[in-house]
Image: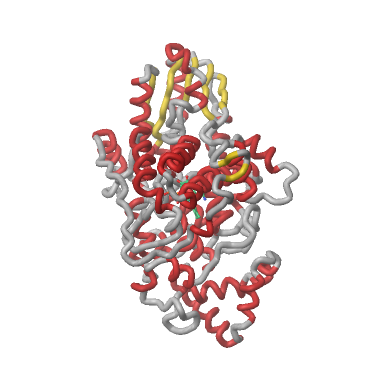
Amino acid sequence: MIGIWVLGTQLSLDQSAVKSCENQKEKTNVILIESQEYAKQRRYHQQKLVLVWSAMRHFSETLKEEGWKVNYETATDFLTPLKAWVKENQITELRVMTPNDRSVSNFIKNLDLACEIVLFPDNHFLWSTEAFQQWTTNRKRILLEDFYREGRKRFKVLVEDNKPIGGKWNYDQENRKPPKKNLNPPSPLNFPPDSITTEVIETVKSLSFPTYGEIDNFNWGVTREDAKNVLSHFIETNLPNFGTYQDAMVTGENTLWHSLISPYINLGLLHPLEVIKAVENAYYKQDLPLNSVEGLIRQVLGWREFLHGIYHWVDVDYGQGNWFNHTQPLPHFFWDSRETDLNCLKQVLQQVENTGYAHHIQRLMILSNFALIVGVSPQELKDWFHAAFIDAYDWVMETNVIGMGQFADGGVFASKPYASSANYVNKMSDYCADCCYNPKHRSQGDACPFNFFYWDFIARQRDRLQSLGRMNLVLANLRKIDADELAQIQGLADNWRDQHCP
Ligand code: FAD
């Protein structure tokens, strides 16, 4: 008898292990396991636990409807139910689609089971690990833009005769508009919990180990049908404006024109190619603005595939990187938004507590940027991101937090760190208007911490930054700050750290 173990991030009928037995369902047993032991290993957002467990339970029902024999186990660990199931069903070969997280993959390879274990290639990405490795061979630079253009040609997306539709590969310059007053973004779809989700919510509420975030606002889809509706809703209502306000941040508007599809693609409920093709088709049929269409496709075909490829390409200790040698503990208010008086951080942290979601610029330029300029340990920050976000997994954390956000890899794929002062926050959001700090001050008593930390960071790290070349203008501006003011700035930064990074 063949057995298939479907993991919580592999919820698709087309995933390779399930597909391999499509014509022999009667000789196959499928198992899904909810493990509380696994959920205890780190804190998780309560809504993430609900999403994953409810989606697994729904997928188990889908498998049964499709004629598969399915065991759904709720257990403390993975091994106990696996062993019992292998024995009871006389499984001789266990098939698993290769998990995209390294530690889970190693765990499965080393399982002590009375059957053969066969890993199938992960088909939830467009680029296989091998294809990505090949692409990097003999390449002087590993740049998203080069990878993305290759992806457009390889998968024939928005191209004609290998040339980009519209004449340009990239319309990013048009996708950085600050928010205007009275923007009116569409609301996300509503997903009232059904009986399965309600049961999972009760289970999660009763857990005895520490979690993070609020559970009562749970409003995520939990089935493939829901995920397809999110995608259609996005294309119909959000896509026309997606590009223009992609980087904007507005108080009380958690999602603006973003797609909210990351939780679903990461669980296997949507396939990236399906997303890309749906968006491309909408461009041809509905005459949508190219900056929005290309912008979304660059995120999925470009960034998502690129960072997944990087995760499997770099050394296994990549996650331990700390190029700036940052060792400050994470300020406690990351775990409790009520404890900060910086309005931008409060707004974004509150939103994450309530939903598990923040859009890219909120993650990069508010949360990660602040930790970077304060000098927080990249690993502590990564652990927090992993706990807090609805769509967090190891592969996407390491590359986005350690690499993109903290530059802790010393620039494997980025040429300079994403560090900025309050100037950027003030331009791209309305947060500063309601803040007790002054975004224009850097050394006075009411100076915004983004400002004194920014200059403290540039001064502390000037030698390393000098070596990057692209920071010369900023370093020249640092030299224009007189010694007394710089000492004041550094004093403010030290005092703040003493109070908030115990
Ligand atoms: P949209 O803005 O609508 O973009 C569409 C899709 O593009 C996303 O759903 C996602 O699948 C893909 N995408 C865009 N950028 C990236 C990227 N940098 N890496 C991977 N996929 C990308 N993404 C996660 O899926 N999980 C995470 O835990 C995560 N953590 C992040 C942490 C930091 C510090 C940063 C800077 C980025 C992180 N991202 C993460 C990437 C990105 O911010 C999210 O994918 C995106 O905000 C999800 O919201 P959305 O679906 O509305 O995205």
Q: Quadrant of residue 282?
A: top left
| For residue 266, above or below residue 469 | above
Q: Residue furthest right?
A: 138
Vertical relation: 68 (above or below) 371: above
Occupied quadrant, residue 65:
top left
Position of 241 relative to 493 (above/below): above
The mark total stands at 0
Q: Nearer the viewer, residue 204 or 390?
A: 390
Query: Picture coordinates of residue 379 (x, y %)?
Result: 54, 55
In the picture provided, is 97 more to the left or to the right than 52? Answer: right
Q: Residue 245, image x and y in percent? A: 42, 58
Q: Identify which residue, 132 or 467, lies in the foreground.
A: 132
Question: Which residue is more in the foreground, 459 or 39?
Answer: 459
Indicate the colouring scheme. secondary structure
Question: In front here: 126 or 494?
Answer: 126
Is residue 73 shown left or right of residue 490? left
Can residue 78 be seen here? Answer: yes
> Residue drawn 45% across and 16% down?
28
From where the camera sits, is residue 50 visible? no
User: Horizontal placement of 437 versus 121: left or right?
Assistant: left
Residue at 66 percent across and 71 percent down: it is 472
Residue 286 lies, in percent from the top left, at 40, 43
